[in-house]
Image (cartoon, rainbow, N blue to C red):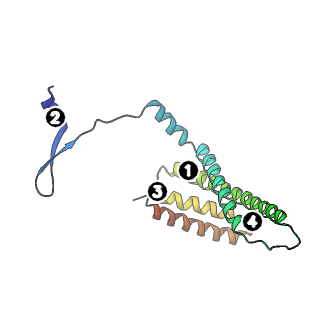
Amino acid sequence: MSSDQDKEFNNIPSSSSDGDQIPVQIQPLRLPTPEEVQGQDVWNNCAVRSVFSGVMGGGLGLFMGLFLGSLDTPLVQEELTTRQQIVNQAKNMGRRSLSSCKAFAVMGFVFSAAECVVEKARAKHDITNTVAAGCVTGGAMSARGGPKAACVGCAGFAAFSVVIEKFFDRYN
């Protein structure tokens, strides 16, 4: 095929709003490489996804705990030196960041695992999976407070999950 014929073959004209013909470039279909397929298979594993989410949630909790711990205003004890007060503040920040790290790691792990299991069971990728995962996560995080707290946690986290999904507009 000559270059003129090649241009005519690849440029199929389409009309614009004012009636002019605009050439449209057709790109060939590219199949994924075996490495890309293997990477997708690994990522579609619920255990891998959940552990990754737990680790990332723990990292986020660590930084949030450090930030929020630094904002706490401890009572200044006049009998302590400045150095002792700094050490005391650093210990409080460490405790707060460790606590936040654990909470966010568990939250990320449970949410991701629940969403992945529900998605695989339903064989659909929609907002219902997010609602179910939010309910499971909220209920699990507040289960120590009893059944009433678990129900409130379920409803609250499910609603929060829907708001976040609508904000990011993933399912339109």
Amino acid type assigned to the residue bearing label 3 in the image: Asp
Q: Secondary structure at mark 2?
A: helix
Q: Residues within 10 Å of mark 2 (few under 14, many from 20)?
A: few
Q: Which residue is mark 3?
A: 126
Q: Secondary structure at mark 1?
A: helix
| Nearest-to-viewer mark from 4 and 2 | 2
Please provide percent x and percent y for residue 6.
Answer: 17, 31
Q: Which residue is mark 2?
A: 7
Q: Is residue 142 visible?
A: no
First-in-chain label (4 vs 3): 3
In the image, 88: left or right of 65?
A: right
Task: Assess whether mark 3 and mark 1 are in contact (beta carbons under 8 angstroms).
Answer: no
Q: Which of the numbered marks, if any, corresponds to residue 40?
A: none
Q: Which residue is mark 4?
A: 144
Mark 1–mark 3 Cα distance, whole angstroms, equals: 11 Å
Mark 1–mark 2 Cα distance, whole angstroms, equals: 46 Å
Q: Residue at x 74, y 72 (%)?
A: 73
Q: Is residue 54 above or below residue 26?
A: below
Q: Which residue is mark 1?
A: 116
First-in-chain label (4 vs 2): 2
Mark 4–mark 2 Cα distance, whole angstroms, equals: 69 Å
Q: Secondary structure at mark 3?
A: loop
Q: Quadrant of residue 67?
A: bottom right
Mark 4–mark 3 Cα distance, whole angstroms, equals: 30 Å
